């Protein structure tokens, strides 16, 4: 269980998040929707410890362990993955050495030989329909928007987090990739019991993915909503309707 | 002197009893003795003596790094380690051999090199080349032996690319030079594997003045690599080499240096290439060691369509000053060149880039690009950049850029969000920064250099 309690954030005296409470369950897909600028990304970034955001004291636990005091890398090693809306470009660092450093840091007791690891990465790249030549390219450097998003998914598949927060993973993906990524997410939920918090402001992805829970972030507050009806409403009338 | 440096694994010295030592200090007498010791022809002695006059007449450079710590009277100008020069590795004296074994020379040879040379203090102790290459007429010798065995070709090229009057330290080298490599590649011969030379300073207060001369005849190819290390002493040593490279029509020469002197060595080197029509010259120059390095490898593009490249990487840690860069002189039409310089600074250190691109009036339609990028890891390190562009016609295109940056927070955060520690994230970013240069090095050098940079950064 990923538990967030009493989280409030203000930027420049403006209340972005107001006393947020949220529980993400393993093996379930939670969707967080809301208009642009509602604070969805702020929430995701705070969970992984982005130092640029100031928050009031809150309670944040992963399977009962307190996360607030932990450094970013420790949170990640505990099994929390937060995908980036704009994945950062790392010039000169190859996809392979990046993934290897991340894997070895996360699983220090399960290190693989370079050859074995390379095979694993190649397979995973194929899973997200990326050519194996990406293995030698600099991370996100010169990638299209969609390629960056797919590399985020590769990282999830390699690092096998317990909980994954997917920040606009659907933006920049064409229909084929959206379908493919959705089936990967479904698989993770089903087989590895990964708890997913999918952040989006569009509803395209719901053609391929059924959320178990829907949360709407509006005016700094989080509202739990009925999945099917609410999505229909938002599609037709926008966020004003909910 | 800085604290003893545990991470510099080449800092040991051994107790080889040299077979011949000249008294400290520099004089005509010392130069005559060096020349006599080497049984040189009289023209070489005259060359040395006139260079010595030039050395005396030139002032110390009034720019660049602080060289006031050099005391020319306290330096040994010639120390001969042994009377025997090994033709096979077995013939090299045991203690010297052990030193090179520790540095990894014989292993290097086993890793498919075309030839290996090793210099210990003032003299080369070993040079070998594969039989197949020597059958094709490729010559790879120490420079002294080459003077004895191939006097005509030697005299034709020696001192022609870097004349003694070029600068004070080129004059000094010309006066007291000893050792270095001589490479001759006949027309249309390709030397597919690198020739490797290794330079070691062992004695205290030594000046090492090797002189390297490479001649690549038309249509040939050769890659020469050199590495250098020295023991850590509380007093300073001087390394003052001259490298001359002649690249003839359509030939291609790459010269790779991984400089890892200990931090008590002044490293003042003059390196220059002449490149003729359609030829290609390349310097790959990595500087991680030394107290002070002043080195600006240059390429004179003398024939139509000649191209030149310089990749330079400098790493400066505590107490070091890496004053590096390069020059591209376009003397013929349709020539092109690229200078890419990367510097990393940490602690109280300095990195300086000096770049010159010159296109003369009659060299039409030339292209050149110069970029220098510095990564400063803290606010104690200083960096400066002096790019100079001198284009004397309108048909040539020259661009240059200089960027100084620090490690970007968002990159660190992204890496850390994937479970990577801050230290490892910094290392990855530094490695990524130097990657464009490191990837051009032969594999074992690349691995070693990455390891060295990491050690330097962890201190």
Image (tube, rainbow, N blue to C red):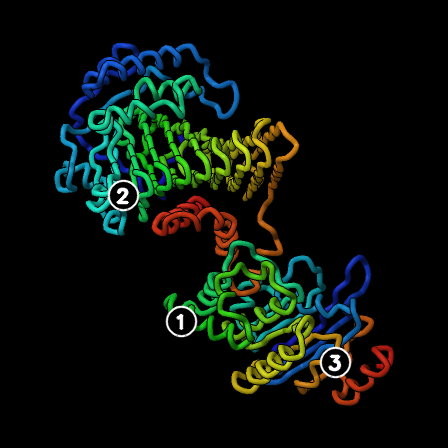
> Which one is earlier in the sequence, the residue at label 3 or at label 1?
1
Q: Secondary structure at mark 3?
A: loop
Name the quarter where the N terminus of chain A is drawn: bottom right
Question: Is residue B321 depicted above or below A145 in this figure?
Answer: above
Which residue is drawn at the image coordinates 28% and 26% (left, top)?
Answer: B154
How much space separates mark 2 and mark 3, taking CA atoms? 63 Å
Label 1, on which residue? A110
Q: Residues within 10 Å of mark 2 (few under 14, many from 20)?
A: some
Q: Position of residue B346 (x, y in %)?
A: 51, 40
Q: Which mark is residue B265?
A: none
How much space separates mark 2 and mark 1, taking CA atoms? 33 Å
Mark 3 vs mark 1, foreground winner is 3
Mark 2 vs mark 1, foreground winner is 2
Which residue is drawn at the image coordinates 31% and 15% (left, top)?
Answer: B47
Q: Is residue A1 visible?
A: no
Question: Is residue B63 depicted above or below A193 in this figure?
Answer: above
Q: Secondary structure at mark 2?
A: helix
Question: Is residue B186 depicted above or below A98 in this figure?
Answer: above
Question: Is residue B411 depicted above or below B42 in this figure?
Answer: below
Q: Residues within 10 Å of mark 1 (few under 14, many from 20)?
A: few
Tags 3 and 1 in contact by the CB under 8 Å rule?
no
Label 3, on which residue? A203
């Amino acid at each position: 269980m990923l538990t967030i309690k009493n989280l409030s954030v203000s930027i420049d005296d403006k209340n972005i998040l107001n006393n947020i409470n949220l529980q993400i369950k393993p093996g379930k897909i939670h969707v967080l929707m809301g208009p642009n600028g509602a604070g969805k990304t702020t929430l995701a970034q705070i969970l992984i410890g982005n130092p640029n955001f100031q928050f009031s004291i809150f309670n944040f636990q992963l399977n009962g362990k307190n996360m607030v005091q932990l450094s970013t890398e420790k949170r990640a090693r505990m099994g929390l993955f937060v995908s980036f809306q704009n994945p950062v470009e790392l010039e000169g660092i190859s996809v392979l050495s990046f993934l290897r450093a991340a894997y070895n840091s996360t699983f220090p007791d399960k290190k693989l030989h370079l050859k074995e690891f390379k095979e694993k990465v190649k397979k995973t790249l194929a899973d997200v329909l990326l050519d194996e030549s990406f293995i030698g390219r600099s991370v996100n450097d010169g990638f299209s928007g969609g390629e960056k998003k797919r590399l985020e998914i590769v990282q999830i598949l390699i690092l096998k987090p317990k909980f994954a927060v997917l920040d606009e993973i659907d933006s920049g993906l064409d229909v084929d990739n959206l379908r493919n990524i959705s089936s990967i997410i479904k698989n993770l939920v089903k087989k590895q019991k990964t708890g997913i918090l999918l952040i989006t402001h569009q509803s395209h992805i719901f053609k391929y993915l059924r959320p178990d829970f829907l949360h709407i972030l509006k005016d700094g507050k989080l509202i739990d909503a009925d999945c099917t009806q609410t999505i229909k409403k938002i599609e037709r009338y926008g966020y004003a309707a909910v | 002197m800085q604290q003893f440096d545990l991470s510099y694994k080449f800092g040991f010295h051994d107790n080889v009893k040299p077979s011949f030592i000249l008294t400290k200090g520099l004089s005509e007498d010392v130069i005559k003795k060096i020349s006599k010791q080497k049984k040189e022809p009289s023209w070489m002695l005259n060359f040395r003596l006139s260079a010595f006059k030039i050395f005396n007449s030139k002032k110390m450079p009034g720019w660049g790094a602080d060289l006031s710590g050099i005391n020319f009277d306290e330096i040994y100008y010639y120390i001969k380690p042994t009377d025997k020069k090994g033709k096979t590795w077995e013939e090299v004296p045991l203690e010297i051999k052990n030193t090179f074994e520790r540095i990894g020379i014989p292993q290097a040879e086993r890793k498919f090199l075309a030839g290996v040379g090793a210099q210990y203090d003032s003299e080369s102790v070993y040079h070998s080349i594969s039989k197949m290459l020597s059958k094709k007429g490729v010559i790879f010798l120490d420079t002294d032996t080459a003077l004895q065995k191939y006097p005509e070709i030697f005299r034709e090229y020696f001192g022609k690319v870097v004349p003694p009057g070029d600068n004070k330290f080129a004059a000094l080298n010309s006066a007291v030079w000893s050792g270095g490599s001589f490479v001759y590649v006949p027309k249309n011969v390709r030397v597919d594997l690198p020739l490797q030379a290794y330079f070691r300073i062992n004695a205290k207060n030594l000046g090492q003045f090797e002189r390297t001369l490479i001649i690549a005849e038309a249509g040939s190819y050769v890659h020469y690599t050199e590495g250098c290390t020295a023991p850590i002493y509380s007093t300073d040593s001087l390394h003052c080499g001259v490298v001359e490279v002649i690249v003839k029509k359509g030939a291609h020469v790459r010269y790779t240096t991984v400089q890892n002197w200990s931090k008590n060595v002044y490293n003042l080197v003059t390196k220059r290439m002449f490149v003729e029509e359609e030829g290609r010259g390349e310097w790959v120059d990595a500087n991680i060691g030394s107290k002070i390095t002043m080195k600006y490898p240059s390429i004179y593009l003398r024939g139509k369509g000649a191209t030149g490249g310089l990749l330079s990487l400098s790493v400066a840690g505590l107490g070091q000053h890496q004053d590096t860069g390069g020059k591209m002189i376009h003397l013929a039409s349709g020539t092109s060149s690229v200078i890419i310089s990367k510097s990393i600074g940490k602690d109280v250190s300095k990195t300086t880039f000096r770049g010159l691109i010159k296109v003369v009036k009659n060299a039409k339609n030339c292209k050149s690009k110069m970029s220098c990028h510095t990564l400063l890891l803290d606010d104690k390190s200083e960096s400066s950049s002096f790019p100079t562009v001198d284009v004397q016609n309108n048909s040539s295109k020259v661009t240059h850029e200089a960027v100084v940056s620090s490690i970007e927070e968002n990159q660190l955060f992204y890496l850390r969000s994937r479970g990577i520690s801050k230290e490892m994230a910094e290392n990855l970013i530094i490695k990524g920064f130097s990657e464009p240069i490191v990837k051009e090095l032969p594999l074992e050098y690349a691995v070693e250099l990455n390891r060295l940079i990491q050690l330097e950064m962890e201190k």
